[in-house]
Image: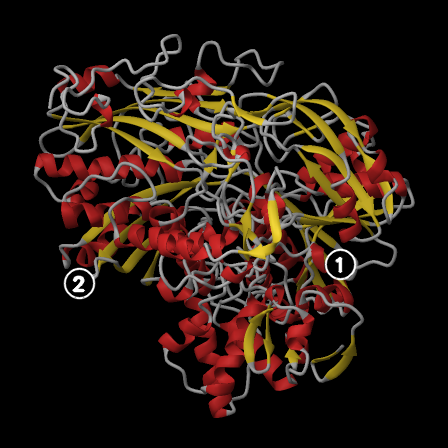
């Protein structure tokens, strides 16, 4: 067939998904692969003038219609769209932006002057996890205006701290030219695929890879015995086995049994299915109750604490005494769920062998030195032989701190001396990387009669999943921040984290504070009503002010802007009876006594300044922040300063992109280095212009600086320990629509110290608030007995046409003496959102809501409706024949009792049961011919208790005793009232009908009297 792509006719021999053809054959890498499920929109192209998700359409379906990707845009279109998206601040991680631009083109080609509703409708099928969509809408407005007015485009020349300049990497990302790991194609490159555990908990008895080794294109199959170094990896605690070997026990579904390396991804995937694994299935430890039981199975044998990962206790003052004298005491229990990061770019890495016998890894992770530290021992080589370089990172939010694919790609490259790519499918990604910790929290809060907080006593229990990841630091942060940003002295909180067979939990934007903030802030609203003061007043009364100490003992500095943030939203809160309010604080920097270095080296090279620092930019804009600081401090124009991508072989280690740290910690290192450069240039010699030098005079020189964010250790005995170098503060107000009771707007006031780049700060606030809205109202990650039941499209992520207005209010306040006074805000932006929204609904109906997602909201009803619709689509729409009995695909029948030739009109009955009009795909439903149970009519394979068995003559029999009262099989009794020995109902029977009392269809029987 012939396919017209970007004006060129392409001849294709076989049919395939359009996405795979564009990327793997034409290498048009602006077309991103975010899910391959038609859910995210990153693969959007234009087909026949319409935006189309290329992962969901075959080449045969586009024949005769032109396909346009970003590479096919005209020069003017590329100029306008890249500038508009960059100027508006619409580009953060950038992974979704090419798809968004193709939606924008399709819209503006038809409507050159669209409304906001038109724009949001046009991009409704495309997910952005970073921006909150506001800046994308602004970008499309700007592009439309430039096209209509044929305006010229001007770029920034001088970058000053505090100005809203275009981000350093925005244009390349917008045009799809920025390189993510999956965009790398190397001649002769191998592809690695993992075979993962079939069970969350099982002993591996035997692994047979012989068939896979002989499969087409396979170069190697690796198992635990092939690891040349230590098999354990782990970000902080080495408790995560890279492989599960024979005789060992799996701990979650993401555990790797084997890695297949082949010439193509498809060949590697097919070969992995040929590996035979024999298991002894074990009951999973699926809940906190299971994990903490005294007789619980311990699945980390070397852990002396059983299934307890760790314990945290923060105790200051005399909590019991203070509570005994409190005028008001409130005790409440809160629950928060496990949630998924849902970054747009699935994990990927490419490893290439080096001449020295080592490897270089190109990856999208949050810390290149961390990846090096985990990979080198795994390969059994010195760290210096492992080089890691950041490609662009398509979002992280904490989910890319742990290694996922990097060490496996490195293993193949190391052993076979050939380049190797490993990437996760979206389904794999949803299972493999750590999630947000689900937590159970018991809080006791005491106040005096004026509303002043006198004490807090709390207990937090977290499910950390199969492995430690960053479970302990998350638990610490959850506990140390649980008291809120308020000035009081008596504070005790105990935290525990348990291992389970659920997916691991680790770093997630907010780092544990999101969970405890929901509990504390909600309680503050509830107790305010008991006291008789407003939800605003209780916060303003207790808010920490400069010179006062937080409950953890730290005296806050003059940069503390909580009161200013409160006062910035006072009118918004008080002007509506359907408004909710919440405060939050979040540390900037790692803190608690841990070494926290920011490092930067400025190299004068080719008449320009190159910034070297191993700070990973995940879309938060650290490259831009450092460039602005350097330009400002050294009085250099933007085109004279460049940034080298983070790497472990040339750039100094500046720590991981976590803890809202880089703007403050690495930003200060860059400022110090730039000050040295400015001194060398003579910028400070204001009275003698002849003493100034040019960059050419400094060619080859380097200016290095570092900054250590010094803090006191966790649990310090000092009366006022310094836990963190800085805290950011926030107040958010959620206002409901009076008619629909949906959120009308959220006002987010954030104390940022100094806003280095205001449009970037706004984008962080807007994106974080939207993530918080999803966490509050819809997002959930369902796990049943250690088995996730999720798809990307079912996570509950909000789309552009579903969101309220978000109003950022930037609070700037002097006082912090590092990084020009700037505080990182990457995490705090989503922390107070949940309690603010919960408070708005509490003021609406008086119902206290103690768990997330919130119940009894318009969003909950919509989500349930969408789940039902998805269920119908799953059940009755499809090209494969399905059983009329169970609606499973014919190939899924374990008894193979389908008569695939004979169609059956019985599908009409299914239509009646599942709703009229749902006949799409019903012609492919076929009748099954199984042996069925005479009791319930289910086929033998579907028996819920496995009571239908084949005897020695090959005949199916019902191998179970029946109840003498109702004739039902004992195991199928819906009331569990049948005694094993007597095979009869235990309860009394109705004297009128003789039925079991509990089985009365009218529900009028008294069990005690056995009478109607």
Residue found farthest to the bottom: 149
The x, y position of residue 568, in whole percent, is 25, 56
- Placement of the C terminus among the 4 image quadrants: top left
Q: CA distance from mark 1 to mark 2?
A: 51 Å
**In the visual, does 60 lie left or right of 716?**
right
- Placement of the N terminus among the 4 image quadrants: bottom right
Pointer 2 residue: 739
The x, y position of residue 29, in whole percent, is 69, 66
**In the visual, does 184 lie left or right of 791?**
right
The one nearer the camera, 323 or 304, is: 304
Q: Can see residue 155?
A: no
- Secondary-structure class at tag 1: loop
The one nearer the camera, 282 or 71, is: 282
Disc sitting over residue 184 in the figure: 1
Q: Residues within 10 Å of mark 1 (few under 14, many from 20)?
A: some
**Up/down of 608 relative to 561, above or below:** below
**In the visual, does 750 lie left or right of 541?**
right
Q: Residues within 10 Å of mark 2 (few under 14, many from 20)?
A: few
Kindly indicate the quadrant of the structure image that contains residue 10. bottom right
Disc sitting over residue 489 in the figure: none
Q: Earlier in the sequence, mark 1 or mark 2?
A: 1
Residue at image location 22% in from the left, 46% down from the top:
839
**Up/down of 804 relative to 401, above or below:** below
The x, y position of residue 591, in whole percent, is 49, 34
Residue at image location 30% in from the left, 32% down from the top:
334
The one nearer the camera, 852 or 564, is: 852
The x, y position of residue 323, in whole percent, is 19, 20
């Amino acid at each position: 067939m012939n396919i017209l792509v970007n004006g060129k006719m392409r001849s294709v021999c076989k049919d395939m998904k359009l996405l795979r053809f564009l990327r793997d054959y034409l290498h048009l890498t602006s077309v991103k692969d975010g899910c391959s499920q038609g859910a995210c929109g990153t693969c959007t192209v234009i087909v026949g003038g319409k935006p189309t998700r290329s992962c969901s359409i075959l080449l045969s379906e586009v024949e005769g219609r032109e396909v346009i990707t970003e590479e096919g845009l005209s020069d003017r279109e590329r100029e306008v769209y890249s500038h508009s998206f960059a100027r508006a601040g619409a580009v953060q991680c950038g992974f979704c932006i090419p798809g968004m631009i193709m939606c924008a083109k399709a819209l503006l080609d038809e409507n050159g002057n669209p409304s906001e509703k038109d724009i949001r409708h046009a991009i409704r099928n495309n997910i952005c996890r970073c921006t909150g969509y506001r800046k994308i809408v602004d970008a499309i407005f700007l592009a439309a205006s430039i096209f209509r007015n044929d305006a010229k485009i001007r770029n920034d020349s001088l970058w000053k701290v505090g100005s809203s300049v275009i981000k350093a990497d925005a244009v390349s990302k917008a045009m799809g030219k920025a390189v993510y790991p999956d965009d790398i194609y190397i001649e002769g490159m191998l592809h690695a695929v993992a075979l993962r555990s079939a069970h969350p908990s099982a002993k591996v008895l035997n692994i047979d890879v012989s068939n896979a080794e002989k499969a087409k294109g396979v170069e190697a199959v690796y198992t635990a015995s092939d690891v040349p170094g230590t098999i354990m990896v782990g970000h902080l605690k080495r408790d995560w086995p890279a492989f599960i070997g024979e005789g060992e026990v799996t701990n979650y579904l993401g555990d790797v049994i084997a890695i297949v390396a082949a010439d193509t991804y498809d060949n590697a995937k097919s070969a992995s299915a040929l590996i035979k694994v024999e298991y002894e299935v074990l009951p999973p430890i699926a809940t906190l109750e299971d994990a903490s039981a005294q007789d619980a199975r311990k699945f980390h044998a070397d852990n002396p604490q059983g299934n307890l990962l760790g314990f945290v206790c923060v105790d200051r003052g005399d909590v019991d005494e203070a509570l005994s004298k409190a005028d008001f005491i409130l005790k409440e229990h809160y629950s928060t769920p496990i949630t998924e990061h849902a970054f747009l770019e699935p994990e990927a890495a490419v490893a290439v062998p080096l001449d020295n016998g080592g490897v270089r890894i190109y990856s999208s992770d949050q810390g290149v030195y961390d990846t090096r530290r985990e990979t080198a021992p795994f390969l059994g080589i010195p760290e210096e032989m492992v080089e890691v370089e950041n490609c662009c990172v398509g979002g992280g939010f904490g989910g890319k701190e742990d290694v996922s694919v990097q060490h496996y790609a490195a293993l193949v490259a190391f052993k076979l001396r050939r380049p190797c790519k490993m990437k996760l499918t979206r389904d794999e990604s949803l299972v493999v990387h750590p999630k947000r910790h689900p937590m159970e929290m018991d809080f006791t809060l005491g106040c005096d009669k004026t509303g002043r907080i006198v004490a807090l006593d709390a207990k937090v229990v977290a499910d950390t999943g199969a492995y430690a990841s960053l479970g302990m630091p998350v638990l610490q942060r959850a506990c140390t921040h649980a008291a809120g940003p308020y000035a009081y002295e008596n504070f005790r909180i105990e935290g525990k984290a348990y291992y389970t067979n659920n997916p691991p939990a680790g770093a997630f934007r907010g780092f544990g504070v999101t969970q405890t903030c929901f509990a504390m802030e909600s309680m503050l609203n509830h107790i305010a009503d008991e006291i008789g003061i407003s939800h605003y007043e209780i916060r303003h009364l207790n808010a920490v002010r400069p010179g006062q100490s937080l409950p953890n003992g730290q005296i806050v500095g003059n940069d503390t802007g909580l009161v200013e943030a409160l006062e910035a939203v006072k009118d918004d809160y008080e002007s509506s009876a359907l408004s909710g309010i919440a405060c939050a604080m979040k540390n900037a920097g790692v803190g608690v006594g841990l070494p926290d270095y920011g490092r930067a080296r400025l190299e004068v090279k080719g008449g320009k300044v190159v910034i070297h620092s191993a700070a990973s930019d995940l879309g938060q804009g650290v490259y831009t922040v450092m460039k602005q600081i350097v330009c400002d401090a050294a009085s250099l124009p933007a085109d004279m300063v460049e940034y080298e991508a983070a790497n472990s072989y040339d750039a100094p280690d500046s720590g991981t992109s976590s803890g809202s740290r880089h703007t403050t910690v690495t930003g200060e290192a860059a400022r110090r280095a730039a000050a040295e450069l400015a001194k060398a240039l003579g910028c400070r010699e204001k009275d003698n212009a002849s003493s100034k030098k040019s960059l050419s005079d400094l060619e080859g020189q380097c200016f290095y600086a570092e900054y250590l964010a010094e803090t006191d250790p966790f649990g310090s005995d000092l009366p006022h320990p310094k836990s963190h170098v800085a805290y950011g503060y926030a107040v958010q107000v959620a206002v409901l629509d009076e008619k629909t009771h949906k959120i009308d707007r959220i006002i987010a006031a954030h104390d940022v110290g100094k806003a280095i780049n205001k449009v970037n700060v706004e984008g962080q606030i807007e994106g974080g608030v939207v993530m918080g809205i999803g966490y509050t109202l819809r997002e959930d990650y369902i796990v049943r007995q250690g088995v996730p039941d999720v798809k990307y499209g079912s996570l509950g992520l909000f789309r552009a046409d579903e969101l309220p207005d978000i109003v950022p209010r930037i609070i700037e306040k002097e006082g912090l003496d590092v990084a020009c006074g700037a505080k990182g805000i990457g995490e705090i932006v989503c922390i107070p959102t949940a309690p603010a929204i919960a408070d708005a609904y509490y003021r609406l109906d008086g119902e206290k809501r103690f768990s997330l997602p919130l119940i009894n909201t318009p969003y909950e009803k919509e989500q349930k409706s969408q789940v039902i619709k998805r269920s119908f689509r799953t059940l009755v729409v499809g090209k494969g024949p399905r059983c009329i009995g169970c609606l499973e695909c014919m190939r899924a029948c374990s008894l193979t009792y389908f008569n695939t030739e004979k169609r059956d009109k019985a599908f009409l009955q299914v239509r009646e049961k599942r709703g009229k009009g749902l006949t799409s795909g019903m012609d492919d439903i076929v009748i099954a011919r199984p042996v069925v149970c005479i009791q319930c009519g289910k086929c033998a394979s579907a028996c819920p208790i496995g009571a239908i068995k084949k005897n020695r003559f090959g005949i199916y029999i019902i191998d179970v005793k029946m109840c003498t009262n109702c004739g039902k099989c004992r195991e199928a009794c819906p009331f569990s009232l049948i005694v094993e020995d007597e095979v009869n109902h235990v309860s009394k029977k109705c004297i009128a009908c003789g039925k079991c009392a509990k089985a009365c269809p009218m529900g009028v029987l008294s069990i005690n009297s056995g009478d109607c």
